[in-house]
Amino acid sequence: MKKIISGVALVAAVSIAAPVFAQSYPTKPIRMVVPSAPGSGPDLIARVVAQKLTESLGKPVVTDPRPGAGGSLGAEIAAKAPPDGYTLVMGSAGSHSVNTALYPKLPYDAVKDFAPISLVTTAPNILIVHPSLPVKSVKDLVALAKAKPGELTFGSGGNGSTAHLSGELFRVLAGANLVHVPFKGAPAAAIGVMTGEISMGILNLPPTLPHVRSGKLKALGVSTAKRSAAVPEIPTIAEGGLPGYEASTWYAVLAPAGTPNDIITRLNSELVKGLRSDDMKKRIAAEGGDIVGSTPEELTAVIKRDIEKWTKVVAASGAKAN
């Protein structure tokens, strides 16, 4: 009888402790790993999200940029961190879908090694060239690339980034011989276009948009199927002369697999609530993104869908990680 009572008492204690633990979390600062360079799209979005979570959770959420290997380095760090709710990661289409398609062997499984929390935002990449390049549209650029095979170069924030495969998709659909030049982050690639080091780039909109607005870069199109609310005056790449082109990026918050469900639920609730606030909508829009907010299950579906899409692009383009 005593053993039965003890067992019942244990179950009752655990059931009571779980919600109490969720209510007390967090008790110390939270690290948000950003698998991208400072100033990049994921970094800019992560800073906005971290500040909002700091306000709602009552503890500092500190961003920790860990660029390298197209986002693989930072994603691996997050995947192998203790699943206690004190390490999060600002994942992206690059770190959590493109890399699976591009790298034969990753040190993490983009689906199994993470506990999805919420999709934060989607954003187009933007096709940019130097203002002096003699093209006014995507159609002009395709014609120039075909007239000068192997002479035009496209930059990206690194192998395995969405910008890399966005460029590969452009090359395949255009039937043009373009040369990929990887940089250490999207901001560096944008500078490469501004200085004339490379011909073009299909880069993250958030860090690139200020240079377009200042006139230092010429925008020819956005990569999404529909025009972006952030820059409605810029046509899509498909509209501009490359039918069928569509490639977008997204940013999402995840935790290491095994993170307690009550913590995931708490973080999802706080994050989605924050994303719906007016100030967050304005701040994300200023960075060129469209706020989403989702359930963990919806985020998982997005990751799996994109892995399938980019696997096909890699097969068709012959893209290599190195």
Image: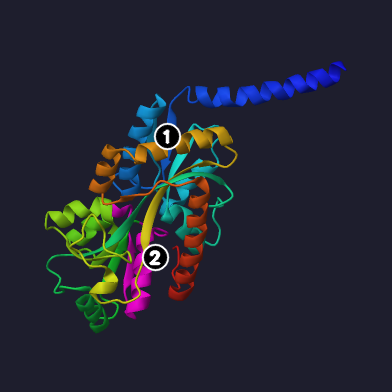
| One can see residue 83 in this view | no
Q: Relative to 216, is 63 above or below?
A: above
Q: Say what secondary structure mark 2 lies in.
A: helix
Q: Is residue 178 magenta?
A: yes
> For residue 218, what is the image quadrant?
bottom left
Q: Position of residue 63 (x, y in %)?
A: 37, 36
The mark found on residue 270 in the picture is 1
Residue drawn 84% across the image and 21% down it: 4
Q: Residue furthest bottom?
A: 147
Please name the residue that numbered disc 2 is placed on.
Answer: 165
Span of residues in magenta:
158-187
Query: What's the mark number on residue 228?
Result: none
Quarter occupied by residue 194: bottom left
Q: Position of residue 177 (x, y in %)?
A: 32, 78
Mark 1 vs mark 2, CA separation in Å:
33 Å
The amino acid marked with disc number 1 is Glu
